[in-house]
Every structure is written in C-alpha cells, then in structure tokens.
Amino acid sequence: MAKSSNLLLYLSVFIFIITKLALAQTCSNYKFSSENLFESCNDLHVLDSFIHYTYNSSSGNLQVAYRHTDLTSKKWVAWAVNPTSTGMVGAQAIVAYPQPDGSVRAYTSPVSSYQTSLQEGDLSFNVSELSATYQNNEMIIFATLSLPVSNGGNINTVWQDGSLSGTSLLSHPTSGKNIRSVSTLNLLSAASGCGGAGAGAGAGDSKLGLQVSSWAGNQPGFSLALTVLSVFALFLRPKPEHKYRVYGNIYHHTIGYTVIILAVVNVFKGLDILSPEKQWRNAYTAIVRTLGLVSAMLEAFT
C-alpha cells in the first residue's frame, strides 16, 4: 500500500512538471496575425523576451518582431543590434513605451555611452516599417532593418527594459538579468533568400530539428524533466532477473548522460554570455575533461 501511495505521488509530481513545461511560453507556439509572419524565432534567455525574424540575404533586409512579456504600462523596452561589439556602447537601438493616452511610441536611438538617456536619433543603418503594440502586458516592436551581414551571418544583439516616470525613461537596473541581456544571432542559418513566410518541406524539417535542439539546450525545465524521468527509472525499472531489465538500464543511462551533457553545454553558454577572464573557461574545460576521463575509465573498469 505504501509503495502504491509513493508511486502515485511521484507520478503526480511528474505530470505536474510536464504540464508546466508544455504550457510554458516559447516563441515557436506564438501566433501573429496573418500580416506578420516570420521564418525563425529565438527564446531570449532573460527578461521574458523573444525575437522573431526573417532575413533576406539578397537584399539585406531583416524583418524583426521583438516581444517582451509580463510588462507593466510603467515600463519601456529596447532591442538593439551592435555592429561593433557585444555590449551596450555602440548599440543601434529601437525603443518603445506606452504613453498615457494608450498609444505606444516607438523610435530609434543610437547608444554612444553608458550614460545614455536613449534620445531619439538616426541609426547607422536604415530602419523602416517601425511600429509597436502594447496589450495584455506584452510589448511588441516591429521593424525592418537594412542590414548587410558579414562575420558568418552573426549579429550582436542587446535588449533591455526599465521604468518610466511619466514619459521620461529612467535608467535600467545594472545588476541581475539586465546585465546578461546580450546574445549573438546567426541570420544566415535561417535566411531564405526570398523574404517570404513559407518554406519547402525539406527546409521545414531542417528548421524543426534546429528549433528542437535549441529549445533543449536553452530550457532549464527540459533538463529538469529529464532528471525526473531518470529518477522515475529507479522506481519503475524491472528487477535484475527480469528479461526487460537491460532496456531499463539503457533508458536510465541514456537519460542520465543526456542531462550531464546538457549541463556542461549550458555552463559553456553561460561563459559565452558573461565573458569572464579566459582562465575561468580554461579551468572549467580542464575540470570537464578530467571528469570525462575518470568516468570513461570507470565505465571501462565496471
């Protein structure tokens, strides 16, 4: 009876976690209206943000929609491309905020110093079709950037939010998530060359594989779900003498190794984002290699 109660409890927890993961918002399950269709999207790792985009490699036009959720009407948001570095200085920003009359103001602002007040000004590249909407605590900025891409198709992006005082923009926080809101976006991996919203079956299948791998590598909940599955394997796997025990072992080891690999990859992603001194990356790499060597020796021995 006790074992049955424990099993029921574990199953309930598992179902709860899986349900939460299924309901978690990701860019791939967001639906725009018919006139706004994008070929690719990324879940940004901080500030409840998402970027949807279509890049036309022949014209250099990048159509983007930057979304920021869980946002009050007393907040401003900004999304930027930095052509010269990975930080804030040099960023070519698009800013938006709700106004007292219910409308939304969207404008461009080049960032030349850390003391910026995000004054309106022209960017180093052309921006057209600029607009923004705010409803249901979600801000969306739409724009088309004339952005010829080099460096293997990579662009440096920055995004921020901060508080409003009337219609004046206050400085954003300088700690926590607000100093980690930078990333590199590769446009050529999703460029169609035609700028349309549709793709052939082959391209769709390839893109789906990229989206799944990207989601798995960036969602902490995915690793948590795998961990829970691994723990359940301890309770549900057949007894040692059972003919299906070997399949239980394969399942358990596969899930376990996958969690370990994702953990290592996520730490490297964190190092890329924070850009600490090189010695920290070298030290972590050395630790991972040592543990991998020891694990391989133990596996061979056992």
Image (cartoon, rainbow, N blue to C red):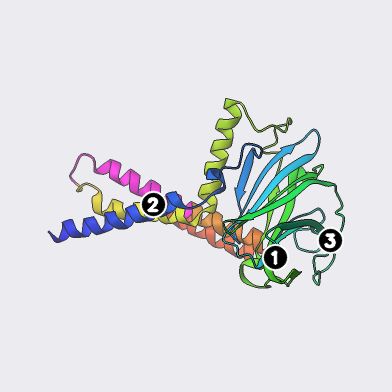
**Res. 103 visible in picture:** yes
* Relative horizontal placement of residue 24, taking residue 54 as reference (left or right): left
Residue annotated with mark 2: 19
SS state under label 2: helix
Amino acid type at image mark 3: Glu
User: Callout 3: few (<14), some (14-19), or many (20+) C-alpha neighbours within 10 Å?
Assistant: some
3 and 2 marks in contact (CB < 8 Å): no
Residue annotated with mark 1: 100
Magenta segment, principal secondary structure? Answer: helix
Residue mark closest to the camera, 1 vs 3: 1
Amino acid type at image mark 1: Pro
Q: Which mark is residue 120?
A: 3
Q: How many discs mark residues in the rendered view?
A: 3
| Picture coordinates of residue 257, whole percent (x, y) | 43, 50
Amino acid type at image mark 2: Thr
Q: Disc 1 and disc 3: Cα gap in Å?
A: 19 Å
SS state under label 1: loop
Q: Which mark is residue 58?
A: none
Mark before the other along the chain sequence, 1 or 3: 1
Check if residue 244 falls in the magenta segment.
Answer: yes
| Picture coordinates of residue 220, whole percent (x, y) | 49, 57
Q: Residue at x 85, y 54 (%)?
A: 123
* Relative horizontal placement of residue 220, taking residue 237 as reference (left or right): right
Q: Residue at x 70, y 70 (%)?
A: 164
Q: Residue at x 82, y 63 (%)?
A: 111
User: Callout 2: few (<14), some (14-19), or many (20+) C-alpha neighbours within 10 Å?
Assistant: few
